[in-house]
Amino acid sequence: MKLAKVNGTHSALVERTVVTVLEARKVSKQVSSPEGVLTILHDISIAMNRGDSIAVVGASGAGKSTLLAILAGLDTPSSGQVWLDGQEITGLDEDGRAAVRSRSVGFVFQAFHLVQSLTALENVMLPLELTAVLGAKDKARAALVAVGLGARADHYPSQLSGGEQQRVAIARAFVNKPVVLFADEPTGNLDSATGAKIADLLFSLNEAAHTTLVLVTHDRSLAQRCKRLIELDSGCLLSDSRLP
Amino acid sequence: MTTTVIFALKALGRETRAGELKILFAAIVVAVAAITAVAFFTSRVSDAFMQQADEVLAADLRLESGRPLDGNNRYTGQAQRLGLRVAHTVSFSTVLFNGENSQLTNIVGVSDRYPLRGVLRIATDLEGVGVPTTTLPQPGEAWADIRILSQLRVPLGASIHVGSLSVKITRVLAYRPDQGAMFSVLAPTLLLAENDIPNTHLLLEGSRATWTLLYAGAAPEISEFKAWLRNNKSAAERLVVVSESNAQLQKTLESSTRFLQLTSLSTLLLAAIAIALTARRYSQRQMSTIALMKSLGASQWFVLRVTALQLFMTAFAGAAVGIGFGWVAQNALVWLLQDLIPNSMPSARVAIAGLGLAVALITLPGFALPPLLRLRNTPPARVLRQTMEPAPLSNVANYSLPLLAFSGVSYLLVRDWMLIGYALCGLLIVAVVFGLAGALVVRVTAGVRGVAGVAWRYGISNIGRRGGESIVHIAAFGLGFTALLLLSVVRGELLNDWQHSLPSDTPNHFLFNISEIQIKPLNQLLASSRIVLPTYMPWVRARLVAINGVAMQKRPRELTERGRAFVEREQNLSWSLKLPQDNQVTAGEWWNEHSLSFPQVSVATEFKDELGLQLNDVLTFDVAGEIVNAPVTSIRKVRWDGFRPNFFLVFPPGVLDAMTGTFVTSLYVGQEGRKTLSQVARSFPNITVLDVGKIIDQIRVLMERAALAVQYVFVFTVLAGVMVLLSALEGSRDARLYEAAIVRALGASRRTLLTAVAVEFSVIGALAGLLASSAAAVAGWLIATRLLGIAYHFSGTLWIYGAGGGGLVVGLIGLLATRSVVSSPPSMALRDH
């Protein structure tokens, strides 16, 4: 609702409420270290619309992963607010944020983060089981088919190649139809050919599901495929530009 | 909730493939098996005794006396007036012979109606099972305990001599209600008709025997008769009632149960350490999965529920298997202790399974929850940065839960906080000592890494590098090995040392029940065989009735069991002008010819201590109805293991000489003199010849059985030590995999790595064994010098057994547990890392 006031008119309210799914306002993050208080993020304010794809780039230590963690509700800022899918997640406790994540968020990680003791199918079922969704198995199987791994459903992660593991992770990220998909260096652990295929898959699924994609990457060419580019430097927002 | 259960079940199913849950499960199995094996066994023994509790006297009331019961007719008359049933028995020990074979035997002559409570069980052949009977041996017949038949090598149906009487053994006596427990092993029973006893001519006046009157009837009449007897019986007669007899039995059972339960506590402690170590590793490994689940939306509560549920399911499964093993294992205890427990044992109590379950449900959460509770706080952002960890739990949370759990289980078992406190302190001290000693040997070992090839250096360096882990292993195995060595090697050495500490001419036979007129012919017989003539000590029985004029019943002093026995039972009094050999006066003065003008008594330190006596205290004795007052004029320290007849109470000559008594002596008889002893037994049937060597051998067998049973319980402790080793190995598995891969990538063969692992664990085992040998030797030395008063010889064998056995056991287990680490392809380990 606060978003509506920012934008003024009633018609704008309806439109903006629908399209703005993620907003950070004056988000800062400080941590204490042996050298004293360290500022990792400094007054970051950004808003993202539904169907957007945003690349967050910057050098190592620029604060990309911290920003992603805070936007996704995995971590809390020292100050500032974050709204995700219409809810201020910075005002929620950890379980409250977990509930929002289970409804609205999907993740793809650089290290895939599959549970080694689960099959591909069971890994994809995991988010559905956590929210007690009915028909989890069928939905997970369909998601695996969508990423081209229908035949490998009963394989364990150790029996899959890196690219296949990342496909499973993508299927898991999309299976509960998230509003926002966070991807942290999704091709970082893959060779360039496989990486390109994974990127194609990610963007095509994102397009089809009309999901907001927040992509943290070092890879400039991957970043160029997004509609918007945010650059961080030493915890500060250096630029926020629309890409052609 | 359903989601949680389904999720926990699925996750548990998957996680069982991982090592940690298997170790958690195995540790619970070992702890529950150790505790339930002991509990099943002790409950069966206790139930067996309690089932027989009402019949342990073979009556409701017994009156026992060291001489024929004077008031027999008067007592019986009163009992019959009250409508009570009456029976009588007489029992005494003698040695039965068949050719060269002999057996100390408890002869029991019984009247009609015996037993008044319970039944006799007999068998008609040696292998037969005892069946209840209401008949009794007829005159000329005897029923014999199977041990008599096997020791004397006589078949059923044969005749043997009991003194001057020849009786035919017609039945095997399988059970009599008042047989007792221990004594029946040393002196098995031969049951005769009471009327046959005089024909044996074994009981002369003053002979050592017990005459008993048995009474049974309705409770009010028994109660009335008991009160009447208390007022009318003589001081020398002893009244035995079921409740008192059972209370004593109950106390003995409770102490043995507690001892075995305390033994199983050491197993529990080690199993708990294994659980704590494994849970730490498990929680570390689960952290990333939990972070992932939380990033996908799992709540803290969900994580906690899943973890707790998995834990309880593991506890339940472990308990079920552990209880099964415990039940199987208790049968071995029954077999080991068969000579000391009733023949027919009731089945084990089902409720013990509940105890096993409680142990599992308290121990596993108690020791595993602290590291697992931490999981709940895993930051979900760990999915992005693996270095992020939940905040550590406070020390209070970390240590209070395990301490509470261990105390709780200990209380469930022992039910005595003071004892638990002592046990915990003892275990703590042992753990600290072993830990410090372990740290020292680990440090010393690091210095010898360069003495052999690469495998040796790699193995030894591992001990030092994983110093903390090595110390835990050394302490855990050291504890189990110490107990095993103490109970096997050191026990055997102590017994040998004690036997060797006795001079070679130490008497090895006792002769009882010698009448004065037999001394001369007996000496002639001994002299003809060149046996050194012994000193004969006279012996009468009397009861202590008062100290300083205060009757024993009115003395307020709390007495120990032994003290009560001094007061309640008849004492053996002797007299001598000279201070007997093996006696030393520690207070007062021994008498001489000039100081014999008044009755006086010299008491042994044990008697003085138990009754709190002092010099000049006046003791009053009832000697066969005659009252004797005597002040204590000296206190003696007696060396009892000289195997010479010694007495707590010795009088000067002239006080008791007129009383009818018998003489006792002891003598050393070599192999060539044994025939003379058979001749003594045949020429003087009333004299009981006791072969000390044989009795010691029998006691040794009993001790060995009991020690084996305790060792058996300690084997579980070693198994729990194995769990600690496995859990620590699981903890260092990834690091070991990585190191092995690097070393193999550099060209080391599989064999070199296996040798290194063998060296590492054999050395840990050998060090634990060395420490255990040293601890067992110190314990042995303390027992020898403080308790037995003999010198202890430190023998190298103990250390060889300890280090060799420890090295072998731990080396093998280590090798088996890590062979998969050594065998896995280096490429895989390097890639995974």
Image (spheres, coloured by chain):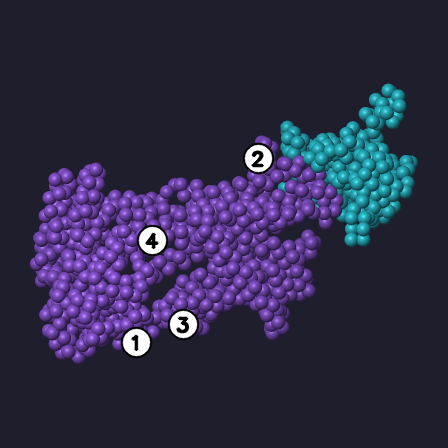
Callout 2: SS: helix
Amino acid type of the residue that numbered disc 4 sits on in the rendered structure? Glu
Q: What color was chain B assigned in the picture? A: purple
Which color was chain A given?
A: cyan
Which element carries disc 4, helix, strand or loop? loop
Label 2 sits on residue:
B5
Q: Earlier in the sequence, mark 3 or mark 2?
A: 2
SS category of the residue bearing label 3: loop
**Above or below B434: residue B261:** above
Which numbered mark, 3 or 4, is in the foreground of this view? 4
Determine which residue is flagged by label 3. Answer: B792
At 36% from the left and 44% from the top, the residue drawn is B348
2 vs 1, front mark? 1
**Which label's residue is closer to the chain start, 4 or 1?**
1
Tag 4–tag 1 contact (CB < 8 Å): no
Q: Earlier in the sequence, mark 2 or mark 1?
A: 2
Determine contact: label 1, label 3, CB under 8 Å.
Answer: no
- Give a yes or no on whether discs 3 and 4 share a subunit: yes
Name the N-terminal-most of marks 3 and 4: 4
How far is mark 3 from mark 2, CA to CA? 61 Å
Q: Nearer the viewer, mark 4 or mark 1?
A: 4
